[in-house]
Image: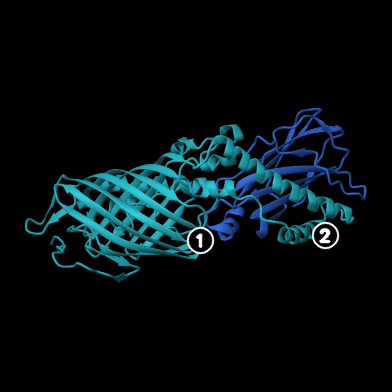
Amino acid sequence: MKSRITIALLCTTLQIITAQSSDTDLKKVEILNSTSLALLDESAAIITSNPNVKEFNINTESLQSISFDGNLFSSNLQGLEYYGLGKTTEDFAPFTMRKIHMPAVSGAYSSNDSLSKVAIGIKFNVFTLYNSTQKKMTDNYNLMVKDISEFDDAVMQQVAKEGYIIGTDEFNNRFATLMQELSQKQKKSPEEFADLLRAPLLTLDVASAYSVIIPAKNFNDSQSGRFGIWSTLALTLGRGGTDLKLFGFCRYLQDNSDYNSESKEFTNHIEYFDYGSKAQLDLDKFALAYEYIKRNGDGKNYRSVGFIQYKVSDNLYITGGFGKNFESSLNDEAVTLLGVRWGINTKDTRSWEAEP
Amino acid sequence: MKKEFTPNGCPKIKLEVQILNNFGFIALSTKVYLDLQNGRSTDKPLFVTPPYLTDGSIPLTLDFKHYNGLLFIRHILSYGAMPGGIAEAEEAAKKLKFNYRIINSCDGTASDYRQSDHGPEFIDGKKIVYFITSIDIL
């Protein structure tokens, strides 16, 4: 019953998101930010932060798992509300909590031969801190607007002077040609404002997720899986193409899905408290990162994973993780990379046995 | 399809322009020109996004005489803050929404128009993209 409710919730959420977006772009794959997969410990990186508003995305990290995520209430954003700054320059502030009104929701489905898992999650950006002052932000924005406006006016005057009739294809073509030519001759536009928005100094995200497990893919046997609530603090040093990001992470996890192969039953209500950190270096098309998470509570454990992300194109990322995951009866301990298993420590891995 | 507005003999109209942008573009400005279609193109905008607005919109204007000319509207946005650069912007630009509303000043009836006619045109050197829309006042 619980699984059916969860699946219904998943479908409803999916419909809400797709209804907000004019179309679903399967090519727009970004795989580092699914709250649901993070709950299941099945993503290459658990510690992630992306405070930007997103369209609906479908993520696939392996053939056995698929997830989606997107922001609610983001379809009518105007001005710089996307960055939490509002519609006017008077709304500019280096510290903003406006994005809390646009939570990111996600869902995940994960399956192997004997077990399926379904998860849903929600994440809020509690605050974003930009490395600037209100005056400096306004000045840099105005500088950008002024530069482009003068550039645009110069092209418009030239096309009109050449006698092209406004509104005709000839006018539009000449305008485009002159825009390109003049942009090559002129110096670069001021980029301070855009750089500032691209790399906030500090962000705090809070997330929560819930999952059910479905043994032997039989809905009647489904039961509560995991519930988790966690926060992620992200500090970004540097701007532009090369950034160093440092993350702090803590998570409360209630796990009802630990399988005891002797009693052939799931152990109920195991509680964990995870905390960890991650360092990530973004270098143009590559992102290199390492995360370590210590697990306390009803079981001592740790996760130690390095990962690499390569931007094949701006719409397609390939991510791989390698290292040691948390030990669990339901998760493989080795983290995989695109179906290629890079196990480092496989001894002590407990095996999953399906109930007869 | 060509956009046309019939003023029904009323010499004055009002205009409102909006950009719905939930993709990370920085909307820089919208400029509205009124071309009289007399063979001499104007290069001075009639309306420009007020400097304090960051959404590239034109709030509802006061009444103005249209002279049965051509409203020529250009939007300019920057993709400089988008982490995915121009490729991300190319995908997102196709989904931007533009709303235009013209109100007949005599009887208050409004006509709404959607989407631009021309664009997106990307200017790499400035990290900007622009769109053009024309509305013929018959």
Crowdedness near tag 1: few (<14), some (14–19) or many (≥20) residues, C-alpha within 10 Å = some
Residue to which mark 2 is pinned:
A170
Asked if residue A234 lies left or right of residue B82, the reply is left
Q: Residue furthest top?
A: B107
Q: Residue furthest bottom?
A: A340
Q: Which mark is residue A315?
A: 1
Chain B takes which shade in the image? blue
Query: What chain letter is assigned to the residue under label 1?
Result: A
Q: Earlier in the sequence, mark 2 or mark 1?
A: 2
- Residue type at mark 2 is Glu
Residue closest to the eye, A151 or A77: A151
Residue closest to the eye, A45 or B94: A45
Give residue A342's quadrant in the image. bottom left
- Residue type at mark 1 is Asn
Query: The residue tagged with tag 2: helix, strand or loop?
Result: helix
> Is residue A238 among what the camera can see?
yes
Residue found at x 20% / y 50% = A295
Asked if residue A307 lies left or right of residue A273, the reply is right
Query: What chain letter is assigned to the residue under label 2?
Result: A
Query: The residue tagged with tag 1: helix, strand or loop?
Result: loop
Q: Which mark is residue A247?
A: none
